[in-house]
Every structure is written in structure tokens, then in C-alpha cells.
Amino acid sequence: MKHLRKTLPFALFLLMVLGVRLFQDRDVVDGMAPPLSGVTLSGQPFELAQLRGKPSLVYFWAVWCGVCKAMQHNIDALAADVPMISVAMQSGDALTVGRYLKERSITMPVLLDDAALAAARYGIRGVPVAFILGPDGDIRYTAVGYSTEWGLRLRLWLAGR
């Protein structure tokens, strides 16, 4: 009985976390990644098909998101060697987002989604969300909320197998 009293709070906590996670993921798309295109803040044209051939990352974030700020170093590390695109959701115009990136020395490719139209196609209600795509463009994993660099790298590796 003593053991049950110690493990019950932990089990209830895990159930609560799982419930929140399922609630967050309820509308997120799966299968083939929806179209995503535009011109990045650096002026480069982008089509999602450019990421095909290797496991890749589609990362939705926002300048006002505290969790996104905490996770940014993980994304920066991936951006150095993983095909990816990031989408700044409801973060303002190009000048505002560009200033934010410059102040923080962030160099990842960024598309703007100020009206959250791309986010809606992906079923996103909040940020951060990372979609790990297989070489064929199929969504293999979705990470809602904070993710470690190594957690994302593991999912990318698995997506390529």
C-alpha cells in the first residue's frame, strides 16, 4: 500500500501529460506534408519539394513564443546540417522578424506566416511544432512543444530508415 501511495501521484502526472499531449496533437496533420512555398526572408524562393531526398524538418515558431526561444539553440544546431525550413507564425512583417533574427544571430531559412494560413493547413494551434519528414515528403513524426536537439536528430534518423 505504501508503494502505491508513492507511485500514484507520478502515474497521475504522466496521465495528465499524456492527455495534454493528445489534446495538442488532435488536429495536426499526418501523411504527406501539405504544400509550403514562398520567398524566405533572405530572398530565396522556396518549395517544400526542395527538401525531398533526405529526412528534413519543417519548424513552426513565433517571435513571441518563450518555448521557441528556449528551443532555438536546438534548431540552430540542426539548421547547420539538416535540410529544413522554418515558418514564423503570427510574428509580424519581414522587418520585425528580420530584426529578431539578426539580434539573436539566427541564420535558419524563414518563411513568414503572419495570417497563420500555412499553420492552419498543418493543423497547428500553437508553437513550437516540428514536423519530421521522410525523404519522400511524408510526415513521419510531429513534435509539439519543446524538443531537444538529440530527440529531433533521433526522429530524423528514424525517418530516413
Image: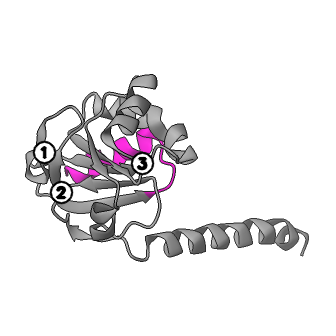
Q: Which residues are magenta?
A: 144-161
**Tag 2 secondary structure:** loop
Of the numbered discs in the image, which one, if any, rests on residue 46?
1
Q: Residue 48 location in percent, x, y? A: 14, 52
Residue located 13% across and 46% down the image = 51
Residue flagged by tag 3: what amino acid is it?
A: Ser
Residue located 39% across and 76% down the image = 27
Eyeballing the image, is 113 above or below 17? above
Bin the neighbour count of mark 2 within 10 Å (Cα to Cα): few under 14, some 14-19, many 20 and up.
some
117 or 8: nearer the eye? 117
Of the numbered discs in the image, which one, if any, rests on residue 91?
3
Q: Earlier in the sequence, mark 1 or mark 3?
A: 1
69 or 3: nearer the eye? 69
Eyeballing the image, is 125 above or below 143? below
Distance Cα–Cα, label 2 vs label 3: 17 Å
Q: Residue 109 location in percent, x, y? A: 25, 36
Q: Earlier in the sequence, mark 2 or mark 3?
A: 2
Judged by depth in the image, the label closer to the viewer, 2 or 3, is: 3
Q: Residue 60 location in percent, x, y? A: 36, 52
Judged by depth in the image, the label closer to the viewer, 1 or 3, is: 3
Disc 2 target residue:
36
In the displayed image of the protein, which residue is found farthest to the right? 2
Bin the neighbour count of mark 1 within 10 Å (Cα to Cα): few under 14, some 14-19, many 20 and up.
some
Label 2–label 3 contact, CB within 8 A: no
Task: Tell me, yes or no, whether the highlighted magenta stretch contains residue 53.
Answer: no
Q: 3 left or right of 82?
A: right
Distance Cα–Cα, label 2 vs label 1: 8 Å
Q: Quadrant of the N terminus?
A: bottom right
Quadrant of res 66: top right
Of the numbered discs in the image, which one, if any, rests on residue 120?
none
Task: Tell me, yes or no, whether the highlighted magenta stretch contains residue 157.
Answer: yes
Q: Earlier in the sequence, mark 2 or mark 1?
A: 2
